[in-house]
Amino acid sequence: MVIFVPLKGYFLNRSLMGFNVDTYIKQHVKDGVILDVRGNIDSDVINKILDTIEDRMISSDELPKLRKKVYNVLVESLQNLYHHVDEVPEDFYDQEAERFGVVVIQKLERGYRIVTGNFVHVEHLPKLEERLQRINKSTFEEIKELYKFILNHQRISDKGGGGLGLVDIAKKTGRKLNYTFEKYNDEYCFFYMNIVIDDSEEGQKW
Amino acid sequence: MEPIIIEGTPKTPTVKFDASEGVFEIKGRSIPENSVEFYKPLVDWLDRYKESPLEKTVVDIRLEYFNTSSSKCILDIFKRLENIHKAKNEVQINWYYEEDDEDMLEAGEDYESIIRVPFKMIEIA
């Protein structure tokens, strides 16, 4: 069953300068989509997504351990979108979306997949890439230490995140971050994250 | 001093800081987008409490979920408690975690390794 959370924005299914969210989603998410949201990601939308997925996991009798992990990782993914999304490009069809983002959630055999997407201005690209690469170059033990280091030494930014969100996602899922940058135009990229949370042993896949 | 009593919401925890009753508790969910806004009054309250604390301050942390932006604010709370402890007052933090919630236990252990205050990890079934 596909649940579409009603949003101000509408679905991005047409190609703009070769850019098409559907292409990525269809390639990476096959069956079992339980939520598909594309539009402005504000606080209310985040609440609706969290409630929808939590109810769904409870009604599917997921084990508390998996349920909590998925919920936690979902909170971080959504708040990453909320805090870090850049303005949409000038020629993008949905100019009303202050924080345009994509959130697709798929039920897997032993867990869930969360795909998020958002625009990143090229100016912000190097810093983001550096963070992602730093995480993926680390061992799992180093990730745990990195988490503690950032927690203890970095001030909370105006955006509130403090740079812990991505590290937390890697730590909780026990997997390296799977991400893609797709060029939109010379100024913007679309940044996808493809996060899998399942009940396999933590760290095994790192 | 005036206690702080805040009812929990789906995104913010229930808070009871009451020196007259010796109750210090944060419980529920802490996943607001802006956690600094929520936690600042608590940190300020502890700064005032530090001037004349109880002989023994026991703080119960029973969180079901917390986001990374709350995690820094919780550390700020603990740093205030550490100052009270440093000033030769007894302080204990009780960190509750549900059975099988290894992430929550690990989060408590992370704090325990950063903050010089006695922690007690308490598993709840």
Image (cartoon, coloured by chain):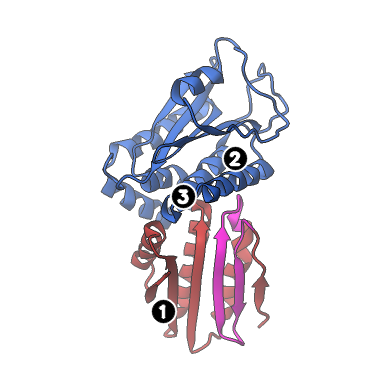
- Res. A203 image quadrant: top left
Tag 1–tag 2 contact (CB < 8 Å): no
What's the residue at 60%, 76% (across, down)?
B17
Question: In the image, residue A206 lies at what x, y percent?
Answer: 28, 40
Front residue of this view, candidates A198 and B38: A198
**In the rendered image, which quarter contains the N terminus of chain A?**
top right
SS type, badge 2: helix
Tag 3–tag 1 contact (CB < 8 Å): no
In the rendered structure, which amino acid carries the disc numbered 3? Glu
- Measured Cα–Cα span from mark 3 to mark 1: 44 Å
Q: Nearer the viewer, mark 1 or mark 2?
A: 2
- Measured Cα–Cα span from mark 3 to mark 2: 27 Å
Looking at marks 3 and 2 on the same chain, the residue that comes earlier in the sequence is marked by: 3
The letter of the red chain is B
- Measured Cα–Cα span from mark 1 to mark 2: 38 Å
| Residue bearing mark 3 | A62
Q: Which of marks 3 and 2 is in front?
A: 3
Q: Is residue A33 visible?
A: yes
- To the question of a shared chain for discs 1 and 2, the answer is no
In the rendered structure, which amino acid carries the disc numbered 1? Lys
- Classify mark 3: residues with Cα within 10 Å, few (<14), some (14-19) or many (20+): some
Front residue of this view, candidates B80 and A65: A65
User: What chain does badge 3 belong to?
Assistant: A
- Res. A184 image quadrant: top right
The tint chain A carries is: blue
Q: What stretch is highlighted in magenta?
A: B10-36
- Classify mark 2: residues with Cα within 10 Å, few (<14), some (14-19) or many (20+): many
What's the residue at 32%, 47% (across, down)?
A143
| Residue bearing mark 1 | B86
Question: In the image, residue B106 lies at what x, y percent?
Answer: 36, 60
When the figure is inspected, residue A26 is found, relative to residue A79, above or below; the finding is: above
| Residue bearing mark 2 | A82
